[in-house]
Image (cartoon, rainbow, N blue to C red):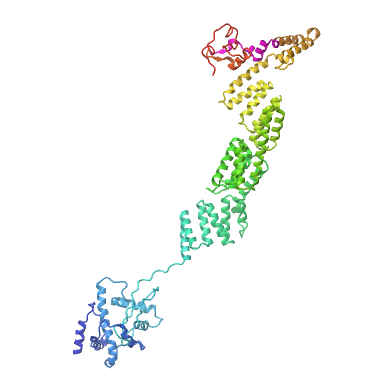
Amino acid sequence: MKGLFNSKKSTKKQPSGDESDPPPPSPQHAHHHHHQSRPSQSQSPSQPQSQAAPSRSEPVSPVKPSGGPSKKSSGSASPGRAQREQPKSRSSRAFGRHSTDARRGKLDLNTHPLNLPPDEYKRLSALNAMSNRNSFDKMDVDKENAAQPPSSPPPPQPQNSFSVPINSPTNGDKSAVNGEGPAPPPHRSNPSSPIPSEAEQAENYKSLGNKSFKDRQYKKAIKEYSQAIELMPDSPTYLSNRAAAYMSDSQYDAALEDCSRAVDLDPQNSKFLLRLARIYTNLGRPEEAMTTFGRIRPAPSAKDMAAAREMQHHMKAAQDALNNGTSGSMVLHAIDQAEKLLAPGATRPRKWQLMRGNAHLKMGVVNSLGEAQNIAMSLLRQNSQDPEALVLRGRALYAQGDNDKAIQHFRKALGGDPDFKDAVKWLRTVQKLDRMKEEGNADYKAGRWQAAFDKYTSALEVDPMNRGTNSKLLQNRALCRLKLKDCDGAVADCERAVSLDPSYMKARKTKANALGQGEKWEDAVREWKKIQELDPEDRTIPREIRKAELELKKSQRKDYYKILGVAKDADEATIKKAYRKLAIIHHPDKNRDDEGAAERFKDIGEAYETLSDPQKRARYDSGEDLIDPQDMFGGGGGGMAGGIDPEILFSMMNGGGAFGGGGGGFPGGGFPGGRPRAPQGFPGGFHFG
C-alpha cells in the first residue's frame, strides 16, 4: 500500500503539459499499473527513444485478447519485464494529459495521430482495422518503425489512410513496449495532387476549346486550341480543330495552313481531307478542292462536291471567253457567278482579279480601262513588284494612249522577272507602234500625205485590239485622206475611230469637216449639233454650227462654179474660157429643139457675170448676198438674226474686212442707208470678245 501511495504522489509531481488522465485501465490490469508506478520515478520524461531499441530488438508476438490474466500471472512478472513496461505507463499518462489540451484548444490538423482525443483514437483504429483486414498486423510494423526513427522526413507520398497505434490488450502485448512509447513520425501535410502530363494538359485545353467552339466563341476557341498545340505540336486532331475555328472566324488562310499540316500528319483521315477540300473551295481554288475530294475514301457525296464543281465550271467558261476573243462582258459574268460561291469574307483569288482586269481591257471603253487600273493598283498595294499587276496597269495606260508610262511599267516588270514573256511582248509592241506613229506624223508635217497615209495604215496592223491607240491612228489617217481629197474615206475612218472610242471628240470634229468638204452640209450641221450636245462647254462649236448652216444655205442656191464646171479657186482666165465654151454649146440658136437650152444659157451668163467680177464673186463666196440687212439684228437686243456669227460677217465684207478702221465695210462707212454705227461695235453697244 505504501508503494501504491508513493506511486500516485510521484505521478502528480511529474511535469507535463497535459492536465487530464489517460483513459482508465481495465480492472484486470489495475494491479499491473501499480507494479509499474515505482520504477517510473527513476526515468526522465525526456529520455530518448533510442534507449528502448535494445529491448525491442527481440521479436515479440502480439498477445491474443482473453477474459483477463490471473493474479498469478500478474504477480509473477519478472523484474526485467516490469522495467520494460514502466515507461509505457508514464508515456500513456503523458499522452492522455496532452489530449486534454487538444480538446480545450483548437485542433491542429498536423498533430500526430497519437495526440488525438480518445474517441478519435477508437474511430480511426476501427477504420484502419477494416481497411487492412487481410493484411499483416500493423502494430508489428509500428513497433519496428518506432525503434528506428528516420533521420530525415521521407519524401511525400500519396496516402489514403493511416493507422493509429493504441496501447490496448486487443492490439498487442504491453510487455513488448519499452520506453515512452513509439516515437511520433514527422508531421506530414496533406499530399498535393499529382502534376498532369503535357498530354493531359493539352487534352484539357482541347476540351475547353471544344466548349468555346460550341458556344460560338471562335477567337477564344482558337486561343485554347493554340495552347494545346504548343504542348503537342504534332497532333493532327488539335490542328484540325483549330482549322475549323479559323474557318468559323473567317480566317481561311490560317485554316488552310493548319488543315494542310493535319493532313500531312494523317494523310488517310477522311475528316481532315474533307475539311481541307472545303477550305480550298472557300478560298476559290476549285481544282485543288476536286483533287483533295478524290483522295477521300469512301468517296464523298455529290452534295459535298457541288460547290467546287460549279465554281470550276464558271472559271473554265471565263478562261475560254478570255482566250477565244469573246466579249469581256461574258468573262465578267462567269467570274461573278464563281465569286458567289466564295465563303463570306474570303479574299478574291489573285488569279481571278487578274482575269477580271484583262476582261476590262478587252472591253476597252473608258470606264472599263479605269476599272482595270483600279484592279492593278489594288494588287500593287499588296506587292509593288508583282510583274503581272505591273503589266496589267501598263496595258491599261497603253490603251489610254499614255505610252510613255506604259513602257515604264513594262520595264519595271522585266526588272523583277527578266523572262516574263508578257512584259517582253507588250514592251516591243508599244515601242514599235510609237515608232511607226512618229514616222507618220513626220511625213504629215512635211506634206507627204501619201507617205503618212501608208505609215498610219501599217501601224493599225500592229495591235488590232488596242482601241484607244487605233482610234487615234484612224483619225490621223482621215486627215491624210482630206488632204488627198478623199472626203468619203475620211468620213469612214472617223466613224471607225468613234466606234472604238465614243468619247473621242477630235475624230467627231474631223468627220464634220469631212462632210462639209464633201459638200454634205446638211449632214455636217447635224454632226456639229451632236458634238455640241456631247461637249456643251466648247465655245468653238457654236461658230462651226453657224458656218455649216450658212454653207447649207449657199448650197441650196445656184452654184455658179458648178454651172461653169470650174473649181472654187479657179482664176479669171479659167472662168472666161469655161464660159465661152459653154455659151457656144448651150446657145439657144444651136439648140432650137431643146426647151431647156435657153434656161441653161441664162444660168451660164449669170454665173459668168458674178464670178468674173471680183466684188460680186467675193460676196457670192462669203454668202453676203444671202443675208437680208433688215434681219441681221433681231429682238432689239443686239443678237444676230438666224444666228449669223460676227466673224462670218467680217469675212463677207469686202474680202474679209472688219467694220471701221479703214478696213472696208458697207458703202458709206457703215450699214446700208448711211446709218451711223457705234464705235468699236454694233448699235446698242454690242462688242466682240
Q: Nearer the viewer, residue 508 or 296?
A: 508
Q: Nearer the viewer, residue 295 or 434?
A: 434
Quarter of the rendering occupied by the N terminus: bottom left
From the viewer's perspective, is 589 left or right of 530? right
Residue 194: percent from left, percent from top: 42, 69
> From this viewpoint, which residue is outermost toward the front?
446
Q: Nearer the viewer, residue 95 or 480?
A: 480
Rendered view: 493 above or below 125 = above
Q: Is residue 611 visible?
A: yes
**Residue 321 in view:** no
Q: Residue 109, located in which quarter of the rendered image? A: bottom left
Q: Is residue 611 magenta?
A: yes
> Dividing the picture into quarters, in which one does residue 326 lie?
top right
Secondary structure character of the magenta stretch overall: helix
* Extent of the magenta region: 610-635
Q: Give the left or right position of residue 565, taking residue 26 as reference.
A: right
Report the side of 244 relative to 578 (left or right). left
**Horizontal and vertical percent for residue 287?**
62, 52
Residue 461 image position (x, y, % from top left): 70, 36
Counting the numbered discs, the total is: 0
Q: Identify which residue, 66 or 487, lies in the foreground.
A: 487
**Is residue 664 highlighted in magenta?**
no
On-image quarter of the C terminus: top right
Using residue 226 as the reference point, say whether residue 434 is left or right of it. right
Q: Position of residue 66 (x, y in %)?
A: 32, 87
Q: Is residue 559 above or below residue 215?
A: above
Q: In percent of the image, x 54 and y 52: which residue is there?
A: 253
